């Protein structure tokens, strides 16, 4: 009996939104998205990261409307026709999380996000796991202090790294992001896992990429669908 009690207690204490139903994490917000004028309000979705959420395809081309923040907006407007939704993109091409953290309060929190998406891992390889963790945790803590819902994203692929391997530097950053999601009980879109699943099923990575480290529209759609799981 004591053993069963311990298992129950462990499940109760350590279950987070990433292991619960994704549909529950934004439950209150989804009710607001269904509210009609004049009781409705503007909902702000803020995407903070590097070149991928910024919309860079084959550099220097920026295909904004085919990037995952705007694919999400397009689908949300189909699901929630009464909602006023702002997609606010604070992403900068080439930036890592250390730089993104420095401007977080002025450039991100100033928009009063209802949901904040963070996507920096692809560029965080150059600053390393420890520096990236410090920056991500700082942003997470600042946002949680404002009662903002947060969804972290693991990286999209880099064609230089084999998705069939499980010990690359992007795997390491992905694992760290998953751990942060669990620690802070916040949302997670495991983009890297989604791409791995496609490749594991026999798909060609080239079909999802516009260049070595930027997804094409099909790749962005894969990430967008992961995000939309929280809104369905």
Image (cartoon, rainbow, N blue to C red):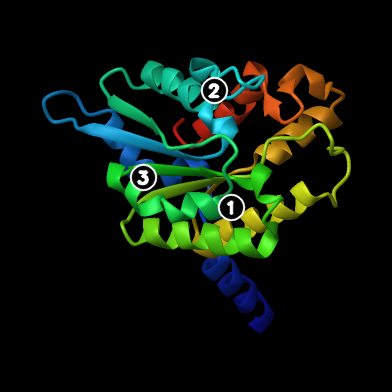
Residue identified by numbered label 2:
67
Task: Give the image location of residue 188, x and y in percent.
Answer: 56, 47
Instruction: Tell me the quarter of the picture where residue 139 sits.
Output: bottom left
Task: Give the image location of residue 147, x and y in percent.
Answer: 32, 56
- Residue at 35 percent of width and 51 percent of height: 148
Q: In the figure, is residue 211 to the left or right of 136? A: right
Task: Give the image location of residue 40, x and y in percent.
Answer: 18, 30
- Residue at 48 percent of width and 16 percent of height: 65
> Disc 3 vs disc 2: which is toward the camera?
3
Residue identified by numbered label 1:
19
> Disc 1 vs disc 2: which is toward the camera?
2
- At label 1, counting other C-alpha atoms closer than 10 Å, the crowd grade (few under 14, some 14-19, many 20 or more) is some
Instruction: Tell me the quarter of the picture where residue 221 sits.
Output: top right
Q: How many marks?
A: 3
Q: Secondary structure at mark 2?
A: loop
- Residue at 59 percent of width and 17 percent of height: 61
Separation of disc 1 and disc 3 at Cα?
A: 31 Å
Question: In this picture, is 195 found above or below 217?
Answer: below
Q: Is there any visible trace of residue 15 in the rendered image?
A: no
The quadrant in which the N terminus is found is bottom right
- Residue at 81 percent of width and 24 percent of height: 205
Question: In this picture, is 51 found above or below 71?
Answer: below
Q: Is there any visible trace of residue 161 in the rendered image?
A: yes
Residue identified by numbered label 3:
107
Separation of disc 3 and disc 2 at Cα?
A: 20 Å
Q: Secondary structure at mark 3?
A: helix
Q: Camera-side residue: 82 or 196?
A: 196
- At label 2, counting other C-alpha atoms closer than 10 Å, the crowd grade (few under 14, some 14-19, many 20 or more) is many
């Amino acid at each position: 009996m004591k053993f069963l009690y311990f298992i129950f207690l462990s499940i109760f204490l350590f279950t987070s939104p990433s292991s619960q139903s994704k549909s529950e994490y934004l439950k209150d917000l989804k009710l607001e998205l269904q509210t009609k004028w004049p009781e409705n309000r503007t909902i702000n979705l803020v995407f903070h990261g590097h070149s991928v959420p910024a919309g860079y395809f084959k550099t220097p081309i920026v295909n904004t409307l085919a990037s995952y923040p705007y694919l999400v907006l397009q689908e949300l407007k189909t699901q929630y026709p009464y909602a006023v939704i702002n997609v606010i993109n604070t992403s900068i091409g080439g930036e890592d999380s250390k730089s993104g953290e420095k401007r977080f309060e002025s450039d991100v929190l100033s928009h009063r996000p209802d949901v904040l998406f963070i996507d920096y891992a692809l560029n965080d390889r150059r600053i390393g796991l420890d520096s990236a963790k410090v920056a991500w945790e700082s942003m997470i803590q600042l946002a949680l202090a404002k009662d903002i819902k947060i969804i972290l994203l693991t990286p999209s692929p880099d064609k230089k790294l084999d998705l069939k391997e499980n010990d690359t530097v992007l795997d390491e950053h992905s694992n760290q992001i998953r751990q942060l999601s669990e620690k802070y009980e916040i949302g997670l879109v495991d983009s890297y896992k989604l791409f791995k699943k496609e490749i594991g099923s026999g798909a060609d990575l080239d079909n999802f990429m516009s260049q070595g480290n930027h997804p094409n529209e099909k790749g962005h759609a894969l990430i967008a669908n992961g995000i939309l799981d929280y809104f369905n």
